Amino acid sequence: MTMTDAQVRAALQSLPIELPSWGFGNAGTRFGVFPETGAARDVFEKIEDAALVHRLTGACPTIALHIPWDLPPAGMDWAALAAFAQEQGIRLGAINPNLFQEREYMLGSVCHPDPAVRRKAAAHLVECAEIAGIVGSQQVVVWLADGTNYPGQDDIRARRGRLKETLAEGYAALTPGVEMLVEYKMFEPGFYTTDLPDWGTAYTICQHLGPQAKVLVDTGHHAQGTNIEFIVATLLDEKRLGGFHFNDRRYADDDLIVGSANPFQLFLIFHELINGNDGRSAAPVSYMLDQSHSIEPKVEAMVLSVLNVQTAYAKALLVDRAALAERQAAGDVLGAHTILRDAYETDVRPLLAASREELGRPADPLCVLRGDAAFQESRRTREATPARAGGGGLGS
Ligand code: PSV
Ligand code: MN
């Protein structure tokens, strides 16, 4: 039995995809930055751009913020920024502490050998927990650049002790109901050790922290060939999957548009998310994009990313789960595999178009955006006007 089109549309319409503020700004690679005309320069413009993506897709009601890149300007408080977002039609989402950019963090933040640096990192975690409480955000997402470059540079176990102790201070400051999502990454900027390199390490840290701590899976943060859907199934089974940072990659943390390099993997991830839930919808975890766009138009890139996530989800919803279970029980290796392939090869474009129209959004949001002369004009106007908050940070 497969789900009906109406059931698939209802499930699709209930999947919120959070946008990263840092994906709208002029980021680049370490080799250069190619500024885009009219790209967002401050938190207001990032919110405006995210709201546009939501108007076009109907799927992105929140924007994740990075602190201090997205601090409201002097004289404005968080409640006012949240109200600005609401006027634009979206809400403020996950709060991401920046524990990697300041000079003191050269040898790490929460794992730094100097207690004074750890105090600073803990205070920033507490500040971010408080911001999340004020703006009604559901998550504080912790990604650390902590690690070492050379054998012997620092004591691996001592760093782990500091990690647990310092993160616990931020955890203790969380408002009830707000989760701390602990993100891991195999390497970079640490090239010898990384203090949170994999899902297992993140999982044990979450166990130490408490029930409000869960693991965040960034699809670009694994070794080549890692079976991410297996990780997803395991974390879901342990009730410690907090959410995703979606992006795609060929080599390392490439931050490419999700679903552009390996759409089959994205489909398989959603298949596990549905399996580990009720078989009819993806687990209610946090779904965010984490991409930085260096050569692609940023708003278009976000829209395409949303469409790619929805495409993978729609195909995964179409898997005939009863038939799959039957073939699996019969030990029919290729019969079972074929059922997954059949769903993956279904053309879901008409279904997605109908779902968007049902929500009063364009059937093809990317096509509408690309043909929108007013949007292009607004970029030129923006470029010719000073930014409101005077700056704002680059993406990662
Ligand atoms: C750095 O690798 C990174 O891309 C992480 O994935 C974080 O989630 C993001 O930056 C924002 O800090
Ligand atoms: Mn990430």
Image: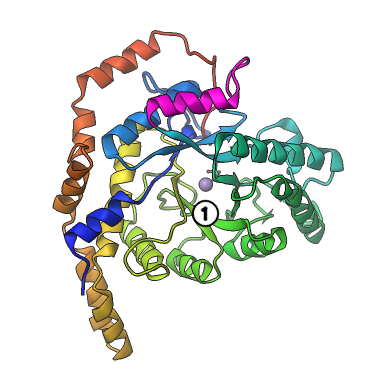
Split into quadrants, the picture shows ligand 1 in the one at: top right
Residue range corresponding to the magenta coloring:
72-89
Residue 184 image offset from top left, x and y in percent = 59, 55
Colour pattern of the rendering: rainbow
Residue drawn at (23%, 65%), measured in percent from left and top? 318
Q: Label 1: how many residues lie within 10 Å, few (<14), some (14-19) or many (20+)? A: many
Res. 194 image quadrant: bottom right
Q: Nearer the viewer, residue 263 or 126?
A: 126
For residue 86: magenta?
Answer: yes
Q: Residue at label 1?
A: 221
Residue 78 image offset from top left, x and y in percent = 58, 27
Q: Secondary structure at mark 1?
A: loop
Residue drawn at (47%, 65%), measured in percent from left and top? 232
Q: Amino acid at mark 1?
A: His
Q: Is residue 255 above or below residue 32?
A: below
Q: Is residue 148 visible?
A: no
Q: Is residue 319 above or below residue 388?
A: below
